[in-house]
Amino acid sequence: MLYIRGISLYPVVVANLDTESLKALLESVCGRLTLISCKNNGAYIKTDLGEYIEKTDNVNIIGYAEVAANLDVDILGFPFIIDGEERTDDIWSSMSPKEFYDRMRAGARVSTSAVSLGRYIEFFTECAKEGTPTVYLCFTSALSSSYNSACQAADAVRAEYPNFELYVVDNALPCATGALLALEAVRQRSAGLTAKQLVDWANEAKTYVHGYFTLDSFDALAAGGRIPPAAAQLTAKLDVKPELSYDLAGSLSLIGVNRGRKKALKSILKSFRENYVPDRTMPIAIMTADAEKDGDWLEAAIRKEEGCADVTIIRGSVGPTIGSHVGPGMVACAFWGKNRAEKASLSDRIARRVRGQ
């Protein structure tokens, strides 16, 4: 049996998933593939459960820790440091989203680092010893050095285990968008794709995943040295809220700016409306950084859009790895939609062809 190992559900998760067990667990909830998402040490779904329950309210299913225990999932957390204390992003197992973001609001200094080369070698060696074909969907190389480290580690492990089938894929997707790609990869593997076919599928499928988000402030970006502190102070005074996305390489891009929070959320809704392709089998993800009320507003608005009344919507909290850079108050929407590659400029399309993409 092929295990899909090293799936980055978020930039902080590496999963060793027995796909048949995962599919059986998820389908047992309501008779079809259902998606699980972390929130405050638990997980919940929003979907049409039909005859199983009368309302499609939040249904507590199982936490990521329990998923790991039941499915033999390896979680390879990214390191982060908060007020001088080094910790591992364990998807809210040891700290709740509220605690983390309250500490950020109180002025806690937070920084992150990539997974080390040594940790990747250790992890891939474990896979090789099991002899299971392995596909690792890695967090976008445009925002992290992890992809380069993973490639170096894969080369080293393949040299020692030449018959071991190991692939590293740059998902070119940040945060929840990577989660959508990973979850669909699990479903496609269950449908019979080989490891190599899954790599080809992922490299094409990732251009159909969209993500748009807004920040409550630029303070975290200023603290991380990504923008000048003066710029953060000015945007706060003007109540400027950005809408951001990412390009085909996975780099962040500014879509526009808005005066006020509600206009920023409406801007995300507009981007969703322009790019979403209705499909009940494909989930939508809404992620927040301790901003559940705004997430609720966005979900309610999306439910009113054509084809979205009963679509599965994943709700979750952004982990410390991403949260430390975006700060509390971020709201994001990720979904499958139109092919982003078709909207690329001529220059970008030439660059992709040169890179062999």
Image (spheres, rainbow, N blue to C red):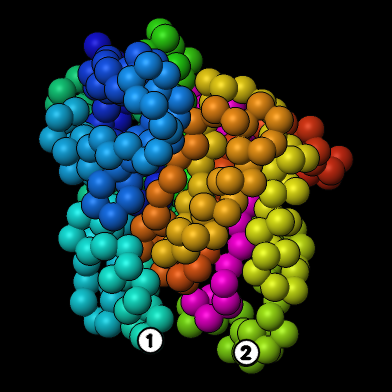
Question: Is residue 274 shown above or below 260?
Answer: above
Circle 2 sits in a helix, a strand or a loop, which is it?
Answer: helix
Q: Position of residue 225 (x, y in %)?
A: 53, 80
Question: Is residue 45 shown above or below 152?
Answer: above
Image quarter (top left, top right, bottom left or bottom right) of the C terminus: top right
Circle 1 sits in a helix, a strand or a loop, which is it?
Answer: loop
Question: Is residue 350 shown above or below 118?
Answer: above
The residue positioned 79% from the left and 33% from the top of the image is 342
The residue closer to the viewer here, 254 or 101, is: 101
Q: Position of residue 287 (x, y in %)?
A: 48, 51
> What separation in Å lies between label 2 and label 1 (alpha carbons)?
15 Å
Give the magenta range.
199-221
The residue positioned 20% from the left and 20% from the top of the image is 131
Q: Amino acid at mark 1?
A: Gly
Q: Position of residue 166 (x, y in %)?
A: 34, 27
Q: Which residue is mark 2?
A: 233
Q: Number of numbered discs present?
A: 2
Q: Position of residue 301 (x, y in %)?
A: 64, 46
Image quarter (top left, top right, bottom left or bottom right) of the N terminus: top left
The residue closer to the viewer here, 219 or 315, is: 315
Residue 276 seen in render: yes
**Which residue sits furthest top?**
192
Left or right: 193 in relation to 270 = left
Q: Which residue is mark 1?
A: 107
